[in-house]
Image (spheres, helix red, strand yellow):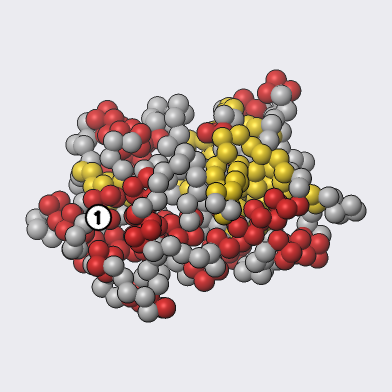
Amino acid sequence: MSNCLETNRQLIVIGNPGNKRTSFLQKARTRLGLPPAHLISYLDWLRYKGSPGELLRPYLQDGKQLPLIRLDSPGEQFEVERELIALGAVCAEEGNRMDPSTEALYQSAAALDAFHPLHHLSTAARISPQEARYLIQEQGRIYHPAQWFRGFCRLLHQIKQQAEALSPSVRWMNDPAEIALMFDKRRCHQLLTAHGVPVPPIPAALGSIGNYEELREAMRTGRMHRVFIKLAFGSSASGIAAYQINPSTGAEVMVTTIGQEYRDQQPVYYNAGSLRKYTDTTIIKTIVNWLCEQGVHVERWIEKASAPAALHKQVFDIRQLVVGGQACHRVARLSRTPITNLHLRNDRADPADIGLTPETIDRIEEIAQATMALFPSSFVAGIDVLLSRDSLKPYIADINPFGDLVYDVQFNGCSTYEWEMTCIYKG
Ligand SMILES: Nc1ncnc2c1ncn2[C@@H]1O[C@H](COP(=O)(O)OP(=O)(O)O)[C@@H](O)[C@H]1O
Ligand SMILES: [Mg+2]
């Protein structure tokens, strides 16, 4: 993809208007003298009676060409979460009837899961669209993640289909198909492996770990005693566990963001605000089995590099942004725990301040750019790069299509969103 996506300066954003992302973006556009982006809300799209592509029609230029479209994160709005879970409920292959509002979203049942080829690896029971719409919000609770992701992939597919029906040559900041791919850690792992981009190795073939016993067996035969177990389509450290087994005693420890409780004798799962440490097999097994039912990605726990004494020798990884094929903003995320996501009250630092040499920074940039080259129809992503403790060898841990909301870092005098807007319209 060229660095210059669009000379016309209009932009459509499909997102959750009024959140920090849309306001940060509009601010960036104002500062650059660009017209405000047209905002379409996911909720309006999801609740549209009829063909929601109609929401795009007012922005057709000369009656036929849509401006560039940016899809934003659907997260942090419970009504959207509920609608996505409802959308993920339909089961065309089982012949279930769709509810009329969902049916309106599709031209053919075969298209339902085109962006989610691994849906068969999620075996969790699904709830009906009606049940989904009655879910009541509880802070931090993780509701039906496999069904949510299925719904999100269907939404992405439908947005692409309907936009292209209106305007066949419509251009995307990030193509919806590639957003679905970036979101699935298993597919990303396969893609990067196939192209020789370093990723933490996996203990067993994709799809072969379906429960706690199979995990333990895979770790034993793969001689991999420390692993990360991840909800395959999680983000913001939701559904992440660092897990280790003592090979001689069999004792186990899990450090995780996952909290678990019982309601009416049913287990429920939530994102704990601070990390939990479990050593009890019963709870570890319950959590692993839940992750496996939803859809799991397991990989080697890379022992991460640590910062100098002035930063308390905390381990770190790097969030590296790539825009238009070029590495730009980056931040080191430091933690006393194995999980470095910033919203977990971890520290951040400029990578230069933790003593990374220009050569190491070059290697981080190269691996991030090589990763983005595998997503030729995407303009921006935030890539999490791990550096191994001794050799500082870089590995890709995570590719975030909405990973550009990074505050207080500048590149060429621009914030992340300002830089994206500059690159899009330059030339
Ligand atoms: N294989 C790994 N080895 C060591 N640390 C890891 C590994 N995978 C993830 N982590 C740590 O866990 C954090 C969250 O994992 P990540 O895959 O980025 O999930 P999320 O999409 O939730 O951000 C990473 O930022 C990193 O600190
Ligand atoms: Mg991450």
How many marks are shown on the rendered structure? 1
**SS at mark 1 in the image:** helix
Q: Is residue 268 visible?
A: no
> Residue shown at 68%/23% (left/top)?
311
For this orientation, the residue located farthest to the front is 264
Q: Nearer the viewer, residue 165 or 61?
A: 165
Q: In the rendered image of this protein, does residue 119 appear above or below residue 416?
A: below
The residue carrying mark 1 is 47
Q: In which quarter of the image is the N terminus?
A: bottom left
The x and y percentages for residue 33 are: 22, 31
Q: Is residue 420 left or right of residue 39?
A: right
> Residue shown at 83%/50% (left/top)?
251
Q: Is residue 355 left or right of residue 233?
A: right
Q: Quadrant of the C terminus?
A: top left
Q: In the rendered image of this protein, does residue 332 appear above or below residue 297?
A: above
The x and y percentages for residue 241 are: 65, 48
Q: Nearer the viewer, residue 206 or 249?
A: 249
For this orientation, the residue located farthest to the left is 62
Q: Which of the 4 image quarters holds residue 290?
A: bottom right
Q: Counting other residues with Cα less than 10 Å from the Cα at mark 1, is it few (<14), some (14-19), or many (20 or more)?
A: some
> Residue shown at 21%/37% (left/top)?
36
Q: Can residue 395 be seen in this view?
A: yes
The x and y percentages for residue 44 are: 23, 50
The x and y percentages for residue 291 are: 60, 57
Q: What residue type is labelled 1?
A: Arg
Q: Nearer the viewer, residue 312 or 82?
A: 82
Q: Which of the 4 image quarters holds residue 271?
A: top right
Q: Is residue 207 left or right of residue 204?
A: left
